[in-house]
Image (cartoon, rainbow, N blue to C red):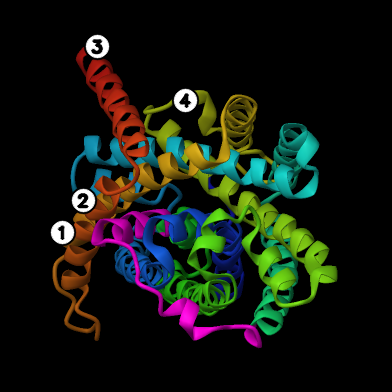
């Protein structure tokens, strides 16, 4: 069987995790989260989403160190639970993250050229796929450059808005408990990129050491950045204005009296989301590879390029589906749908981690965190907007029906 080359160390893995997370939450999700939970509620939801993501990250890191191969929870579910659990996780990941790729591409179009958003989105998918097909080393290098540029833009936004923060705006009454859970489910969409490190497990050097270090480090850095910018966004705009904003961070800079810098933020948004799309397509392609190896997807997608050592057929197939969704779909629907299916994916991750048992050498109560992650994922998934819940569980049910039909034929 063709294997992928192990080229990524801890810094490379952290950078890919950062590139996968930074952008989605800040440039896309803050507004609908504020609409669901209010100002104070948004910050509570952000902390809740971060905690559940930490639980999931702990379980993902333990499992990825035990099974250092491409596929993430698709592999863990198969190995620790049963083949159906693995299939359901892989199906949910591929479908949900394909929708997420489309949402990111459409966001690039909306920021870069609103009048031709779909055309720009298609071109972005083509360009990013071309980079990924050159090899994971190229992906890590490109992502590192994007992350540095994005961090500079986010620091500019934080500095510009800090002097205009009003704690009266932050201290306004929050939304309902269900609104906070809805916002947390949407905000979870912004944290899910840490698992990209695990899905690249077959290309990480010394995975037993690298993955457990890289996952929580990347997640912790992003949580701090999100909290700072969440306080700034709510404190400058207030919950109502933030909820109605199409470009929250650009509006923060404008409200702070620096409208001339809005174009810098828009450029930063384009860069950030491109970084997300770059790593996201790589992760989906590798889960597709793993599923094809087990014949849960067409076997022809399991090919690895002889020179660049990437799953080129899987990545091209994913790119084609993303382009189709870009042409037919919209951003907000894709975000809710993706959040629902990915939360189910991580529920299976935590269930698989529970089978590993206690690990006395670890300082963290890993079994307790796995239980909290499992319960939290289910709770957030069912409290998403109704349309997202129905669409997400509907597609998962279709996948289950396909699995049953295929098994019966065998």
Q: Position of residue 34 (x, y in %)?
A: 45, 61
Which type of secondary structure does the marked residue at label 4 adopt? Answer: helix
| CA separation in Å, label 2 and label 4 | 23 Å
- Disc 4 to disc 3: CB gap under 8 Å: no
Disc 1, SS: loop
Position of 3 relative to 221 (above/below): above
Please name the residue shown 63% across and 33% down the image: 319
Task: Identify the secondary structure beneath mark 2.
Answer: helix
Kindly check if marks 1 and 2 are in contact, taking CB atoms under 8 A apart as contact.
yes
Residue drawn at 53 percent across, 70 percent down: 238
Q: Which mark is residue 355?
A: 1
Instruction: Specify which label sits upstream in the sequence, 4 or 3.
Output: 4
Numbered range of the magenta stretch: 162-187
Labelled pair 2, 4 in contact (Cβ < 8 Å):
no
Which residue was labeled with disc 3?
409
Side (left or right) of 247 relative to 385:
right
| Mark linked to residue 299 | 4
- Name the mark on residue 80: 2
Task: Of the two numbered discs 1 and 4 on the same chain, state the one appearing first in sequence.
Answer: 4
Where disc 3 sits, the SS reads: helix
State if disc 3 and disc 1 touch (CB < 8 Å).
no
> Residue 123 location, x and y as percent?
77, 36
């Amino acid at each position: 069987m063709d294997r992928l080359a192990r080229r990524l160390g801890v810094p490379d893995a952290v950078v890919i995790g950062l590139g996968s997370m930074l952008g989605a939450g800040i440039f896309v999700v803050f507004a609908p989260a504020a609409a669901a939970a209010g100002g104070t509620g948004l910050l509570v939801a952000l902390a809740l989403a971060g905690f559940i993501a930490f639980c999931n990250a702990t379980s993902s890191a333990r499992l990825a160190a035990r099974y250092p191969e491409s596929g993430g929870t698709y592999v863990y579910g198969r190995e620790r639970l049963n083949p159906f659990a693995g299939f359901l996780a892989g199906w949910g990941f591929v479908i949900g993250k394909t929708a997420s790729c489309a949402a990111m591409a459409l966001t690039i179009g909306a920021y870069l050229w609103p009048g031709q958003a779909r055309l720009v989105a298609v071109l972005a998918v083509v360009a990013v796929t071309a980079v990924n097909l050159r090899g994971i080393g190229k992906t890590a290098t490109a992502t590192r450059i994007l992350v540095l540029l994005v961090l500079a833009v986010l620091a500019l936004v934080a500095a510009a808005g800090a002097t205009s923060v009003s704690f009266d705006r932050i201290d306004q009454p929050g939304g309902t408990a269900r609104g906070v859970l809805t916002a947390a489910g949407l905000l979870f969409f912004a944290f899910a990129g840490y698992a990209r490190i695990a899905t690249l497990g077959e290309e990480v050097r010394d995975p037993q050491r690298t993955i457990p270090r890289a996952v929580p480090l990347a997640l912790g850095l992003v949580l701090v950045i999100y909290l700072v910018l969440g306080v700034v966004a709510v404190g400058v705009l207030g919950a109502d204005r933030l909820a109605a904003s199409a470009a929250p961070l650009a509006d923060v800079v404008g409200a702070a009296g620096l409208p001339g810098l809005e174009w810098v933020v828009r450029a930063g948004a384009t860069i950030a989301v491109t970084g997300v799309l770059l790593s996201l397509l790589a992760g989906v392609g590798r889960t597709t590879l793993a599923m094809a190896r087990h014949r849960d997807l067409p076997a022809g997608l399991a090919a690895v390029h002889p020179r660049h050592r990437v799953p080129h057929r899987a990545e091209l197939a994913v790119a084609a589906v993303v382009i189709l969704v870009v042409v037919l779909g919209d951003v907000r629907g894709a975000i809710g749908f993706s959040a629902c299916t990915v939360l189910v994916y991580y529920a299976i991750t935590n269930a698989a981690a529970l089978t590993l048992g206690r690990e006395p050498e670890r300082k963290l109560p890993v079994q307790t965190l796995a239980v909290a992650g499992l319960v939290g994922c289910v709770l957030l998934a069912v409290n998403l907007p109704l349309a997202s819940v129905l669409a997400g569980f509907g597609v998962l049910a279709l996948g289950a029906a396909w699995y049953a039909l295929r098994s019966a034929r065998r």
